[in-house]
């Protein structure tokens, strides 16, 4: 049944407005513990900063901070961390109607080692965590059907019942006409094996319309250390409108059915790269939600990627993911300053 035109959702927009531009992120949300000192091991770190995180949730908040409409679907522990995380979504203007709580399992935690160059290593506490236990029956299908873009990663594919919930949510979103956006966000430490990770990541590859991978993920999936156009183009499929390969401080390569190229990065002094890719994705999806035809016009697409690159760059200048996500004014300042 079609929603009434004047009904409202929690972030103050009408259902009609949300259905036109709503970006729904599906997956995990957790607490990152980031060391107060970079370049030391976890054991040597003198202290840790508590930071809300989880790639799909980061994307949802990145979208909202940039003025877009977003929602998050996932499961948290019925504990202080879980309720804190839901409140952070609400405070940042993200529709949290898709969030459910598990009374038995805890909210996931991750301890992060920051190398001196801002790159990261992870140690996870989730055995199992609440996000892994989301079931199909707990999905807010009404919210998912409203998505213009449905965004997800691969961590929710690792175990049941969350894997089945993920596949069901994708199908409902696709049947509702949503653009499917996929960022595998590889975390090898969470998978039983590299082979299983590769197999499961690729198992849903051909359903996505927009895919973002990092240079490291490109190497992992293809076995090629160098990102050559021929191998990148081989990853394209009939339904894929846009493939993006982020190169950190070197920028981003883009591939469509009709053209491909590269957009340079912005030069900043990185402190913590956590969330940079999610900021990039949030910015990109914000623009696509407003105008899907962007991916058909190379000049327009390059401008959007430049904007997304700026979002990613700003996020690396602060510790933690969500606290570092920029608003549009900050992004435009960096672009104009460059």
Image: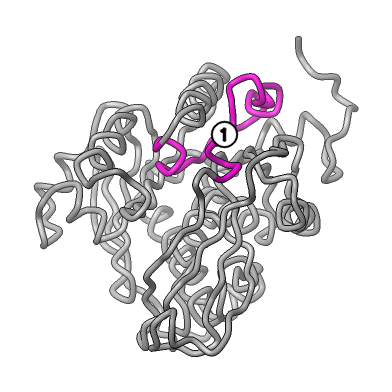
Residue plotted at (48% across, 40% down): 152
Residue range highlighted in magenta: 129-158
Along the horizontal axis of the image, is 316 left or right of 39? right
The percent coordinates of residue 175 (x first, y second) are 52, 16
Q: How is the image coloured?
A: one colour
Is 229 located above or below residue 180 in the figure?
Answer: below
Is the residue 153 above or below the residue 307 in the image?
above
Q: Position of residue 336 (x, y in %)?
A: 53, 81
Quarter holding residue 268: bottom left
Tell me where residue 286 appears, x and y as whole percent. Answer: 58, 50
Judging depth in this view, the residue of 333 and 144 nearest the camera is: 144
Q: Residue at x 32, y 72 (%)?
A: 264
Image height check: is 261 above or below 131?
below
Q: Nearer the viewer, residue 1 or 217?
A: 217
Viewer-side residue, 11 vs 136: 136
Residue farthest toward the right in the current orientation of the protein? 6
Residue placed under numbered mark 1 in the picture: 133
**The stretch drawn in magenta includes residue 139:** yes
Residue at horizontal 68 percent and vertical 42 percent from the top: 71
SS assignment at label 1: helix
Tell whether 336 sits left or right of 86: left
Residue under the point 54% across and 35% down? 150
Residue 205: say if magenta: no
Q: Quadrant of residue 251?
A: bottom left
Q: On the rendered image, what quadrant is the N terminus found in?
A: top right
> Within 10 angstroms of label 1, few (less than 14), some, or many (20 or more) residues?
many
Residue 56 at what x, y percent from top left? 54, 49
């Amino acid at each position: 049944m079609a929603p009434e035109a004047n009904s409202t959702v929690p972030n103050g927009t009408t259902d009609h407005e949300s259905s036109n531009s709503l970006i729904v992120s599906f997956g995990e949300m957790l607490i990152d513990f980031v060391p107060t000192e970079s370049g030391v091991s976890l054991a040597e770190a003198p202290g840790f900063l508590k930071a809300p995180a989880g790639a799909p949730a980061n994307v949802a908040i990145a979208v909202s901070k940039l003025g877009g409409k977003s929602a998050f679907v996932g499961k948290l522990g019925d504990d202080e961390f879980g309720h804190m995380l839901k409140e952070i979504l609400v405070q940042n203007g993200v529709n949290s109607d898709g969030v459910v709580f598990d009374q038995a399992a805890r909210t996931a935690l991750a301890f992060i080692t920051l190398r001196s160059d801002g790159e990261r290593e992870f140690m996870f506490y989730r055995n199992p965590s609440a996000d892994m236990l989301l079931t199909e029956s707990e999905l807010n299908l009404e919210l998912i059907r409203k998505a213009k873009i449905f965004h997800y990663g691969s961590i929710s594919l690792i175990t049941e019942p969350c894997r089945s919930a993920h596949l069901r949510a994708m199908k409902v979103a696709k049947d509702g006409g949503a653009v499917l956006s996929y960022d595998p966000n590889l975390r090898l430490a969470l998978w039983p094996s590299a082979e299983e990770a590769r197999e499961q990541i690729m198992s849903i590859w051909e359903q996505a319309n927009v895919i973002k991978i990092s240079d490291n993920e490109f190497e992992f999936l293809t076995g090629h250390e160098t990102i050559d156009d021929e191998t990148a183009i081989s990853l394209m499929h009939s339904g894929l409108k846009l493939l993006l390969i982020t190169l950190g401080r070197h920028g981003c390569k883009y591939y469509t059915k009709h053209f491909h190229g590269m957009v340079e990065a912005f030069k900043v002094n990185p402190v913590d790269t956590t969330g940079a890719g999610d900021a990039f994705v949030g910015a990109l999806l914000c623009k696509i939600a407003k105008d899907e035809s962007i991916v058909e016009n190379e000049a327009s697409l390059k401008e959007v990627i430049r904007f997304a690159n700026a979002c990613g760059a700003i996020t690396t200048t602060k510790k933690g993911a969500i606290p570092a996500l920029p608003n549009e004014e900050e992004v435009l300042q960096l672009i104009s300053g460059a």
